[in-house]
């Protein structure tokens, strides 16, 4: 084996280029089973982020269902999910451009189902007996806040819409009982988010398309209920965090019965519609995924004995669990394998990959092995993260050099990071830059109490944990304390801006469509998150003082390090004005700063050419700030005051 080249960290030449990160990779989402057919959605950055419904037939043939230019993506809650439903070869989906529902039969072209209007639909379930689609409707026809309801859509009558349930701020998860006689659903109201508190309701479906005999089964303002579903014989199951952990329950004989009490999460925050972490093999057997100690597991749960038996798989991140007979299909990933659609034969416990997000693989010698870490943080508490040391088989650094560190603060902030293979992280580590992906207080996956650490403390707890994670690695001798950077997207961008403004641990930062002005966000955002800050900061305008106190835009005089900002021009969640004002303030102070905008992008970048530009621009920025040579030519970025 050849002796590795000795070169400074950051300057290593890597086969994981920006083209590799975005090229040939698709996003995999929303698995559905229809008889022996497997469906999923592919998000294709090479097609401008278009989402395409895919069908895999029993003979292994994989075909596109959604023809261009149709884009199967709803804008309900802006984050979407639950973009399509399928039953007996009929597919109904929301199209992004006009937000109309379209219907089609396998092998036939789609036809518009609903009329053109300012209405959005999501999270549908098809009732073949009545020829109806039950779904969430978000009505933007009036002034002010959108109105959310549960509706039925006539699949054969010109898409006529009938409102079934209304009066609350939000609805999700309409689920039809096996005999078609009942509908279950979730609902919640401002200022709650669905991970704060929801209610599970059931009603009788009548022949006149109305719902009667409505009963609230479980839930409230401080109990988060998610993922209701019916067993084959008609028992209602759901996931609740009433014990502090999202565990499985069922409603039987008018009683709530726990099925598997564990300090583990069988649910996840409902940022998007259509999550599924369990499914039924039979009346007494469930296949479920749960998260414990930062990784996911797949298991069999006997509903009679309550015994949980783990299925040994190498996948560490598991979602979209769907079950039909002895076949389980899910989305899985591991530290060494990219995200894939996986089919598991329960008779043999043998997994088969049906589709990989990326077909070509990079040699393992260029991949950093993630390591879950725990570190001390404020108030004698513990926080969590995933550490990726630099790795490139062709290079080593000088003996006395330590690598730069990028601390990543995930979005949400009620979200989490997993140790699955991400080329967007390996892009950095293969160049000699260490990465710490922080699951700060407020992240999901560690129980309700950990999520609630962020209540009233956003901009404090998350920042403390990112700072303390970096310090932990510096004190361990793993990274260079003089070359610490922080980056984040959306809410993670806010954490980044707060860390750069209110702390002095980091020497540079990158904000991707991050929040700089909390007050502006409270006044100008979409319905789903319009009261989110009540819990994270405090009620507005009553606690306007806190909104000002924790907004980096008001304290740019404290900034003392370089910054780069990235922003989509059409972002409705965090409007461009936030980044523009921060850029102007930092530039006026004389600090090195760069600002890149992208036409046609919303909240999150979906176009391949833009994702590539963002990666390379950020690397270019760090090379100038941390003084290392780039191994490859990159289009320069205009950095003011450099």
Image (cartoon, helix red, strand yellow):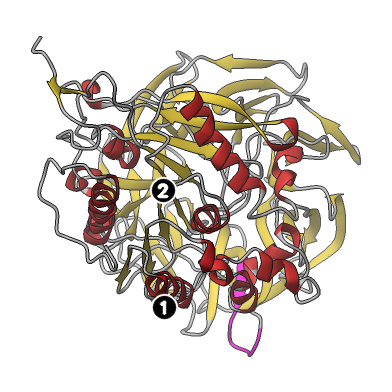
Up/down of 32 relative to 349, above or below = below
| Residue furthest right in the image | 254
User: Is residue 131 at least partly visible in the picture?
Assistant: no
Question: Real-space Cα distance between discs 1 and 2?
Answer: 44 Å
Q: Which residue position holds label 1?
A: 98
> Could you tell me residue 147's position as x and y percent?
67, 78
> Could you tell me residue 641's position as x and y percent?
29, 67
> Which portion, as a residue range, is magenta?
136-144
As helix, strand or loop, the secondary structure at mark 2 comes to loop
Q: Which residue corresponds to the image point at 22% horizontal and 66% vertical from the top-left?
A: 638
Q: In front here: 439 or 445?
A: 439
Quarter holding the N terminus? top left
How packed mark 2 is, by other alpha carbons closer than 10 Å (few <14, some 14-19, many 20 or more), is some
- Asked if residue 424 lies left or right of residue 410, the reply is left
Q: Which residue corresponds to the image point at 29% horizontal and 21% vertical from the top-left?
A: 400
Q: In front here: 510 or 599?
A: 510
- Asked if residue 394 lies left or right of residue 529, the reply is left
User: Is residue 64 at least partly visible in the picture?
Assistant: yes
Q: In front here: 23 or 381?
A: 381
> Could you tell me residue 355's position as x and y percent?
31, 36
- Asked if residue 366 lies left or right of residue 31, the reply is left
As helix, strand or loop, the secondary structure at mark 1 comes to loop
> Could you tell me residue 542's position as x and y percent?
81, 74
Q: Which residue corresponds to the image point at 58% horizontal and 82% vertical from the top-left?
A: 140
Up/down of 244 relative to 367, above or below = below
571 magenta-colored: no
**Front label number (1 vs 2):** 2
Q: Which residue position holds label 2?
A: 507
How packed mark 1 is, by other alpha carbons closer than 10 Å (few <14, some 14-19, many 20 or more), is some
Numbered marks: total = 2
């Amino acid at each position: 084996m050849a002796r590795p080249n000795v070169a400074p960290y950051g300057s290593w030449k890597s086969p994981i280029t920006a083209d590799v990160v975005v090229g040939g990779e698709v996003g995999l989402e929303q698995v559905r089973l229809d008889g022996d057919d497997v469906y999923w959605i592919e998000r294709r950055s090479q097609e401008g982020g278009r989402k395409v419904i895919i069908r895999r037939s029993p003979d292994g043939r994989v075909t596109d269902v959604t023809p261009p230019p149709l884009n199967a993506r709803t804008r309900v809650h802006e984050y979407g999910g639950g973009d399509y439903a399928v039953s007996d070869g009929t597919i109904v989906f929301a199209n992004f451009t006009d937000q109309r529902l379209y219907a089609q039969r396998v092998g036939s072209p789609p036809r518009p189902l609903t009329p053109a209007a300012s209405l959005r639909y999501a999270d549908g379930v098809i009732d073949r007996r009545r020829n109806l689609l039950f779904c969430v409707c978000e009505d933007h026809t009036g002034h002010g806040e959108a109105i959310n309801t549960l509706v039925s859509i006539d699949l054969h009558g010109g898409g006529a819409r009938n409102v079934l349930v209304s009066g609350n701020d939000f609805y999700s998860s309409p689920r039809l009982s096996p005999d078609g006689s009942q509908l279950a659903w979730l609902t919640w109201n401002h200022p709650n988010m669905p991970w704060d508190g929801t209610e599970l309701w059931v009603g009788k479906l009548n022949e006149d398309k109305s719902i009667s005999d409505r009963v609230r089964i479980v839930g409230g303002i401080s109990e988060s209920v998610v993922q209701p579903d019916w067993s084959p014989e008609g028992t209602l199951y759901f996931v609740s965090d009433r014990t502090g952990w999202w565990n499985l329950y069922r409603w039987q004989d008018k009683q709530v019965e726990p099925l598997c009490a564990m300090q583990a999460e069988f649910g996840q925050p409902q940022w998007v519609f259509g999550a599924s972490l369990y499914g039924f093999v039979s009346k007494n057997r469930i296949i479920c995924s749960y998260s414990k100690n930062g990784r996911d597991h797949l298991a069999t749960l006997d509903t009679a004995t309550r015994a949980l038996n783990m299925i040994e798989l190498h996948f560490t991140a598991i979602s979209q669990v769907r079950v039909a007979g002895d076949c389980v299909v899910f989305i899985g990933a591991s530290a060494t394998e990219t995200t894939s659609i996986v089919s598991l034969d329960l008779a043999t416990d043998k997994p088969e990959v049906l589709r990989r997000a990326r077909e070509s693989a990079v040699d393992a010698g260029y991949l950093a092995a993630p390591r879950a870490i725990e570190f001390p943080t404020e108030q004698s508490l513990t926080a969590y993260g995933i550490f990726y040391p630099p790795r490139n088989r062709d290079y080593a650094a000088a003996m006395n050099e330590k690598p730069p560190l990028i601390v990543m603060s995930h979005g949400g902030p009620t979200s989490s990071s997993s140790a699955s293979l991400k080329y967007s992280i390996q892009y950095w580590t293969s160049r000699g830059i260490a990465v710490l992906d922080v699951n700060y207080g407020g992240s999901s996956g560690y129980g309700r109490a950990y999520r609630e650490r962020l209540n009233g403390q956003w901009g404090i707890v998350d920042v403390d944990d990112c700072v303390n994670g970096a310090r932990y690695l510096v004190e361990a001798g793993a990274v260079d304390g003089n070359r610490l950077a922080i980056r984040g997207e959306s809410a993670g961008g806010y954490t980044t801006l707060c860390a750069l403004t209110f702390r002095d641990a980091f020497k540079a930062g990158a904000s991707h469509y991050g929040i700089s002005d909390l007050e502006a966000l409270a006044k100008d955002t979409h319905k789903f998150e319009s009261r989110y800050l009540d819990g994270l900061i405090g009620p507005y305008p009553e606690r306007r003082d806190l909104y000002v106190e924790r907004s980096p835009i008001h304290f740019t005089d404290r900034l003392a390090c370089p910054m780069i900002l990235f922003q989509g021009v059409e972002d409705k969640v965090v409007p461009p004005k936030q980044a523009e004002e921060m850029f102007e303030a930092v530039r006026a102070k004389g600090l090195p700063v760069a600002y890149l905008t992208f036409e046609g992008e919303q909240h999150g970048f979906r176009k391949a050419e833009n994702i590539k530009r963002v990666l390379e621009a950020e690397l270019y920025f760090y090379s100038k700030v941390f003084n290392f040579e780039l191994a490859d030519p990159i289009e320069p970025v205009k950095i003011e005051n450099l």
